[in-house]
């Protein structure tokens, strides 16, 4: 039995090769792997000795030779193949242990050049892997050190690697090379600054963890990390306490973080089931927490809280009083972290770069039955020069401040969405209604129920899309709302503008909507 070993990731390779030699396996190797095996006292044949042809072109050509690939691709049950091997004096190769040039590690380095990246595109490795995998019934092919143990166990117990295991290893190879090629294609697309949506979309992610279940207990789930994603994502968070994050925890926390990134001042966002339930901004983080909490003391129970300033002991003492699922902040005072860790089920996460926004060219993906719909992320909030006051009354400076606040919030409310705000605090949120006036009425009712009867008086209203009728203005007036921000663009805009003028409500058009489905 012969094994060809050529690995970039040399984890466990010396131990694995020693065991193979003890089992009577002849080792063929290349370059740095050959050197490492020889230094460990392991007998091996260098690839150039096998092929009779030296490595050349700075190592670009080593294994690209008929002696190697005929030895891999010959079907042992095919007499014609075996006869040709004998005539050509080529011996079969029964095992390939290969992992590829570190392309991912190269492109993730700070300041990497295109030349460095291209030089780390492996050619011979994928060729050997694909050849061996194609002939899986005769060749065991390994790309992952975690599989060394299983292969050794079968060789020791059965004298061969089982057909079932070889088939598993085959599938793993094509998964591995597919991911590798996708990374290369994605890197080249970014190098070209290609912002088009490709004709054939391939993406690759690496698994962080398996989950107990998905949205519901009968659904399987796992968490994957985008390769090369810059900081500021939940995938980079350090967990200091609590159980593993669930599918719903991650989904809800991600939504809360994306809303938080819209703010630079001290801000707290509370989220429940993918919608914000309380948002507060202030000149200090404790006051911001109180605003977010008091916005909806009911819904925050069992919710997600994300914070863009260090968690102080005083803030930790307040948060500890209620049941929360997840807290995320850029840092924690030592005493604050110790206090929160006394709640064993509370997931406490640290995300140092919490304010780093998403790449504007990132994809937002939604799976549909039989396909995938893809768009770039909603990275814009508004265009300043497009803001237009359309009513007779101009909003005051304070109203404008609250309108901007409410517009940030409503961007992340499920459509049809309405957000009410006052003094940089969300006071009522109406998410996911099939009728826009229902969303407005729900936000108003919640404000009065959850805060007090006067919560909407002097508040402002933000709508994620235009008003098709003037009924939302009517509802706003009855609630005491004094200013509205919305995209505009309805054929009935004049109806809403006229109604605002009638009631003395200021209205601002953004020229940009924020549907979120």
Image (cartoon, rainbow, N blue to C red):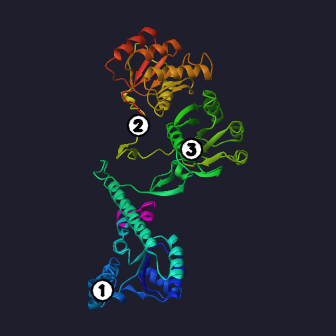
Residue at label 2?
A: 380
Closer to viewer: mark 3 or mark 1:
1
Q: CA distance from mark 2 to mark 1?
A: 64 Å
Residue at label 1?
A: 82
Tell whether 331 sits left or right of 54.
right
The x and y percentages for residue 361 are 38, 46
When the figure is inspected, residue 234 is found, relative to residue 413, above or below; the finding is: below
Residue at label 3?
A: 249
The residue at the point 46 percent across, 72 percent down is 165
When the figure is inspected, residue 231 is found, relative to residue 481, above or below; the finding is: below
The residue at the point 53 percent across, 83 percent down is 19
Residues tagged 2 and 1 counted as in contact (Cβ below 8 A): no
The x and y percentages for residue 303 are 60, 37
Whichever of labels 2 and 1 marks the residue nearer the N terminus, that label is 1
Closer to viewer: mark 2 or mark 1:
1
| Magenta stretch in the rendered image | 98-115
Q: Quadrant of residue 81?
A: bottom left
Residue 117 or residue 49, whichever sits in front? 49
Q: Is residue 99 magenta?
A: yes
When the figure is inspected, residue 361 is found, relative to residue 112, above or below; the finding is: above
Residue 311 or residue 138, whichever sits in front? 138
């Amino acid at each position: 039995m012969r094994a060809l070993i050529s690995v970039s990731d040399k984890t466990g390779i010396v131990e694995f090769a020693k065991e193979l030699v003890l089992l009577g396996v002849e080792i063929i190797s290349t370059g740095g792997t050959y050197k490492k095996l020889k230094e460990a006292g392991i007998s091996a044949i260098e690839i150039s000795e096998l092929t009779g042809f030296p490595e050349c072109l700075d190592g670009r050509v080593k294994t690209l030779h008929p002696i190697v690939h005929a030895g891999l691709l010959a079907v042992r049950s095919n007499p014609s193949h075996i006869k040709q091997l004998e005539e050509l004096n080529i011996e079969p190769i029964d095992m390939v242990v290969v992992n590829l040039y570190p392309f991912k590690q190269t492109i993730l380095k700070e300041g990497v050049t295109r030349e460095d990246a291209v030089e780390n595109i492996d050619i011979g490795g994928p060729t050997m892997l694909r050849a061996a995998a194609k002939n899986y019934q005769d060749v065991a092919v390994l790309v992952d050190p975690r599989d060394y143990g299983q292969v050794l166990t079968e060789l020791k117990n059965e004298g061969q690697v089982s057909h079932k295991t070889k088939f598993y290893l085959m599938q793993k190879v094509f998964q591995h090379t597919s991911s590798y090629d996708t990374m290369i294609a994605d890197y080249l697309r970014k190098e070209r600054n290609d912002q088009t949506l490709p004709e054939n979309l391939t993406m690759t992610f690496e698994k962080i963890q398996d989950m107990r279940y998905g949205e519901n207990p009968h659904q399987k789930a796992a968490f994957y990390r985008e390769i090369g994603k810059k900081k500021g994502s939940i995938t980079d968070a350090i967990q200091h306490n609590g159980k593993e994050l669930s599918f719903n925890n991650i989904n809800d926390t991600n939504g809360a973080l994306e809303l938080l990134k819209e703010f630079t001042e001290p801000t707290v966002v509370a989220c429940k089931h993918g919608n914000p339930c309380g948002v507060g901004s202030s000149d200090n983080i404790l006051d911001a927490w109180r605003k977010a909490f008091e916005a909806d003391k009911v819904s925050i129970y069992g919710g997600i809280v994300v914070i863009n300033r260090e968690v102080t002991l005083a803030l930790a003492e307040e948060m500890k009083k209620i049941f929360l699922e997840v807290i995320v902040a850029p840092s924690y005072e030592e005493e604050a972290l110790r206090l929160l860790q006394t709640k064993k089920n509370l997931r406490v996460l640290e995300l140092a770069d919490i304010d780093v926004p998403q790449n504007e060219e990132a994809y937002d993906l939604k799976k549909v039955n039989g396909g995938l719909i893809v768009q770039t992320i909603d990275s814009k909030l508004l265009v300043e020069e497009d803001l237009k006051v359309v009513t007779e009354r101009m909003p005051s400076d304070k109203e404008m401040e609250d309108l901007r606040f409410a517009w940030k919030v409503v961007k992340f409310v499920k459509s049809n969405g309405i957000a009410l705000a006052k003094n940089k605090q969300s006071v009522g949120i109406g998410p996911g209604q099939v009728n826009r006036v229902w969303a407005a009425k729900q936000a108003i009712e919640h404000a009065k129920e959850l805060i007090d009867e006067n919560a909407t008086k002097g508040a402002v209203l933000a709508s994620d899309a235009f008003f098709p009728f003037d009924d939302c203005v009517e509802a706003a007036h009855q609630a005491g709302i004094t200013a509205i921000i919305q995209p505009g663009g309805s054929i009935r805009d004049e109806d809403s503008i006229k109604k605002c003028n009638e009631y003395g409500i200021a209205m601002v058009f953004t020229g940009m909507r924020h549907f979120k489905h």
